[in-house]
Image (cartoon, rainbow, N blue to C red):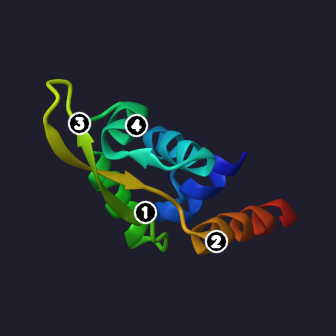
């Protein structure tokens, strides 16, 4: 499962944090709004999860975008995505794990 590989890459001690698993699986599918990361993870600390991924080797950049909030006012949000290098790291980890 690709998401488990990503968590092993991105977390210390190869833990299987289910929040991390859900976020990586979602990011492998498509870029996600910061607010979506919170919802997908099931917590309100999405940026902390992304910071953990970065600490352990994934770039996971955040693009700032302008949106309309539910009241019709302009606001800024971030969209996180995996870089091609991030995907390569995840795939390499999956290959190493499969070879064991």
Instruction: Say the numbered circle drawn on residue 1.
Output: none
Mark 1 residue crowding within 10 angstroms, few (<14) / some (14–19) / many (20+): many
The residue mark sitting in front, 3 or 2, is 3
- The quarter holding residue 92 reads bottom right
Give the residue pinned by disc 2.
89
Residue at the extreme right: 99
Determine the residue positioned at 16% across, 42% down: 74
Determine the residue positioned at 14% across, 24% down: 71
> Of label 1 and label 3, which has the lower sequence position?
1
Q: Is residue 33 left or right of residue 82?
A: left
Give the residue pinned by disc 4.
41
Looking at the picture, tell me which residue is in the foreground, 16 or 66: 66
Mark 2 residue crowding within 10 angstroms, few (<14) / some (14–19) / many (20+): some
What secondary structure is marked by label 2?
A: helix
Give the residue pinned by disc 1.
53
Q: Total label count? A: 4
The residue mark sitting in front, 1 or 3, is 3
Whole-percent x, y for residue 25 in the image: 59, 44
> Of label 3 and label 4, which has the lower sequence position?
4
> Of label 1 and label 2, which has the lower sequence position?
1
Query: Are the residues flagged by discs 4 and 2 in contact, CB closer than 8 Å?
Result: no
Query: Are the residues flagged by discs 4 and 1 in contact, CB closer than 8 Å?
Result: no
Give the residue pinned by disc 3.
68
Determine the residue positioned at 50% across, 50% down: 31
Q: What is the CA distance from the residue labelled 3 to the residue labelled 4?
A: 24 Å
Q: What is the CA distance from the residue labelled 1 to the residue labelled 2?
A: 12 Å
Whole-percent x, y for residue 15 in the image: 51, 52
């Amino acid at each position: 499962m690709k998401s488990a590989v990503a968590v092993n890459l991105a977390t210390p001690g190869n833990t299987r944090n289910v929040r991390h698993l859900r976020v990586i699986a979602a990011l492998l599918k498509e870029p996600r709004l910061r607010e979506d990361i919170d919802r997908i993870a099931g917590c309100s600390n999405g940026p902390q999860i992304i910071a953990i991924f970065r600490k352990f080797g994934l770039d996971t950049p955040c693009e700032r975008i302008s949106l309309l909030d539910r009241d019709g006012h302009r606001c800024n949000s971030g969209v996180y995505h995996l870089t091609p290098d991030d995907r390569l790291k995840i795939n390499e980890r999956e290959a190493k794990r499969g070879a064991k």
